[in-house]
Every structure is written in C-alpha cells, then in structure tokens.
Amino acid sequence: MEFSYDYKPAVIGKQKNIALIAHDNKKEEIIEWCQENAEILKHHFLFGTGTTARMIAERTALPIRGFNSGPLGGDQQIGARIVDGKIDIVIFFSDPLTAQPHDPDVKALLRIAQVFDIPIANNKATADFIITSDFMNTTYTHRLIDFDKSVHDRAQQLAEEEKEAEKQN
C-alpha cells in the first residue's frame, strides 16, 4: 500500500533567522559575503557554528549567536532549531574538495533543511540568490508535511495491515 503526505502551511516571518556555517577552507569566503551583505543581514537574526560565528562577529560587527563547532555538535544544534521552527534559512559554505570528519552531521543538517522546506545555500552563488530575493523583505508561506497527521495515518495503516495479516493466518 502506498503512503502519501498531507501538508499544512507554515510562515517564515519578515525578519528571518539565518544560520551561517562554513568549513575551514570557506571561512574567509563567508566572512567576505557577510561584509558585502551586512546592510541586509543586520535586519535579521543570525546564528552560526563555532569559529565561523566568532569570526563573523569580530570581522563584521554583525550580532550573531554562536553554537558549538560543527564537529562538536554545532550542525546538530542548528538542525534541532530547524525542527523547532527557529531557523528559517541556512547559508552553509561547504568545502566539496576536503573530507570532513563530521560529514554525517552535515548530511543530517542538509536532510532536515529539506524535510522542513527551508532555503539552504551551500555556495556563494545560491546565497546571493537567496539574500537578494524579494522574499527576504516579506513573509513567506510554504508547505510543510503535517507530521502529526502523517504519523497517525501511518500507524493506522500499519494496524490495518496487521489485522489483515492475522485474518490470513
């Protein structure tokens, strides 16, 4: 039996909660990007992982709340805030040419951003498109999977399948 999802609307507010993350070889690039976009970023709430957040704060004067370093759970802290609806956008300048010891955490973060349908940029070009979008200055309504209904429906479906299997035995 095929399973389908129901959706419900979710609103990203006018003032965005933006996570800023960069691998070591991309830290200078994200700092330069923040400097170039400081006039836009200063109107939003900024969050970052470890050294990236500290460097952005020191070099741009933008207020930013720092979490743990990525390898020490920072990516997971950002992911948890996505789940809680407290991060609206992720700007993650990742280094595709260097192996990362916390790669599973990075993949989990990318996956959770997809599941919760939030914009995520993993390079400067995508970040530029996001930051210059008309949606940066307004609310944005998107569709989220109705997880409560999906869990209820899936449990009901499994119970029905179990009953049917018992009848056949």
Image: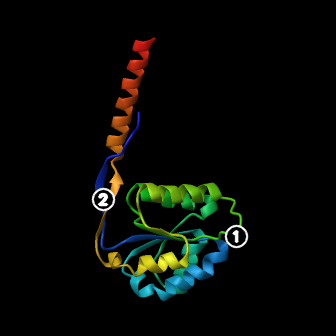
Residue type beneath disc 2? Ala
Q: Which residue is mark 1?
A: 97
Q: Label 1: how many residues lie within 10 Å, few (<14), some (14-19) or many (20+)?
A: few
Q: Label 2: how many residues lie within 10 Å, few (<14), some (14-19) or many (20+)?
A: some
Looking at the rendered image, the disc whose residue lies closer to the viewer, 1 or 2, is 1
x and y percentages locating residue 140 in the rendered image:
30, 68
- Left or right, 51 with reference to 66: right
- Colour theme: rainbow
Q: Residue at x 46, y 58 (%)?
A: 114
- Left or right, 106 with reference to 101: left
x and y percentages locating residue 112 in the rendered image:
48, 55
Q: Nearer the viewer, residue 7 or 29?
A: 7
Q: Residue at x 39, y 39 (%)?
A: 3
Q: Nearer the viewer, residue 11 or 126?
A: 126
Q: Which residue is mark 2?
A: 10
In the depicted structure, whether residue 63 falls above or below residue 166: below
Q: Please tell me whether mark 1 sits on a helix, a strand or a loop.
A: loop
In the depicted structure, whether residue 5 falls above or below residue 74: above
Q: Quadrant of residue 93?
A: bottom right
- Left or right, 25 with reference to 153: right
What is the distance, in whole Å, between disc 1 and disc 2 at their CAs? Answer: 35 Å
